[in-house]
Image: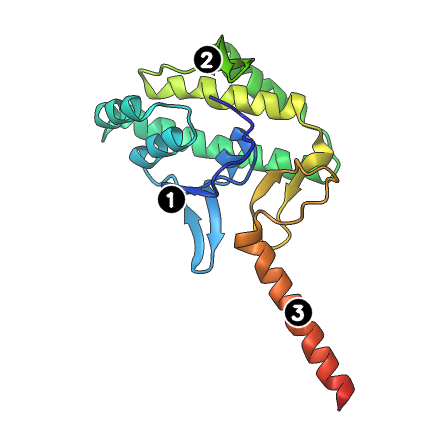
Amino acid sequence: MSNTSQAPKEWIDGFLFVGNHLALDFLNTRLVLAEGPKELLPDVGALVRWLVASDVLTPQKGKTLARKWRDTPRAAMFLQELLTFRERLRAVVVRQEAGYSVSDVFISELNSVLKQHPSVIALQWKGQKLDREAVVEPEEPDDIWAAIAMAVAELLSDVPPVRLRKCETCIVHFLDTSKKGSRRWCSMNICGNKIKVAAYQQRKRAAGKKMH
């Protein structure tokens, strides 16, 4: 599992991956589309599909867990707890983007989750480079906390807050990995082109008014 993606596909199995970090891609499982707000994790099956799309789980493990967790009260309760945590994380990221620090309350909450659900770390070859990765082998829904909590901890400790961005036109958050740190949109395909087209049309209208 890699928390930072170098060249992710934007949409995988119906999920958006433009955050450049697992924790931010997790935030972006709630979107506002043209037709209105959209929850991408409405049920446990969707959560498992997102974990597979995120490379947290292998496809085979995902199939096994989807069958095992389907319609179980424990999995449904975990999903609601996870989504509640996601919105608290959103508030933290928004505060960081505004220049404020992470609250002690959230740090305490995250530390509690990390203590209850510690991650197993292993070294794996990534081409010619050894990479340190969390090994995720969940059996029960609560085991997913290890992957999510570790990703959030790495986001808050390793990522400079000045590199956290919210798209100028939607609610998507991302880690700006551009050299100049000047990325403005979640994606050129999703929002960037819309802004450029709108700006062009505005300039065209302004030029037309001057001619008259």
| Nearest to N terminus: mark 1 or mark 3 | 1
Between label 2 and label 1, give the one nearer the viewer.
1
Separation (CA) of disc 1 from disc 3: 31 Å
Task: Give the left or right position of residue 212, taking residue 15 as reference.
Answer: right
Residues under labels 2 and 1: Cα distance? 28 Å
Q: Position of residue 136 (x, y in %)?
A: 41, 16
Name the residue that disc number 2 marks: 117
Secondary structure under tag 1 reads loop
Q: What residue is drawn where x is 39% and y is 17%?
A: 143
In the picture as drawn, the residue positioned furthest to the bottom comes out as 212
Point out the frontmost of discs 2 and 3. 3
| Callout 1 amino acid | Gly
Asked where in the image residue 199 lies, by quadrant, the reply is bottom right
Q: Secondary structure at mark 3?
A: helix
- Callout 2, which amino acid? His
List the residue tagged with mark 3: 200
From what the image shows, is residue 179 above or below residue 103?
A: below
Q: Is residue 136 left or right of residue 155?
A: left
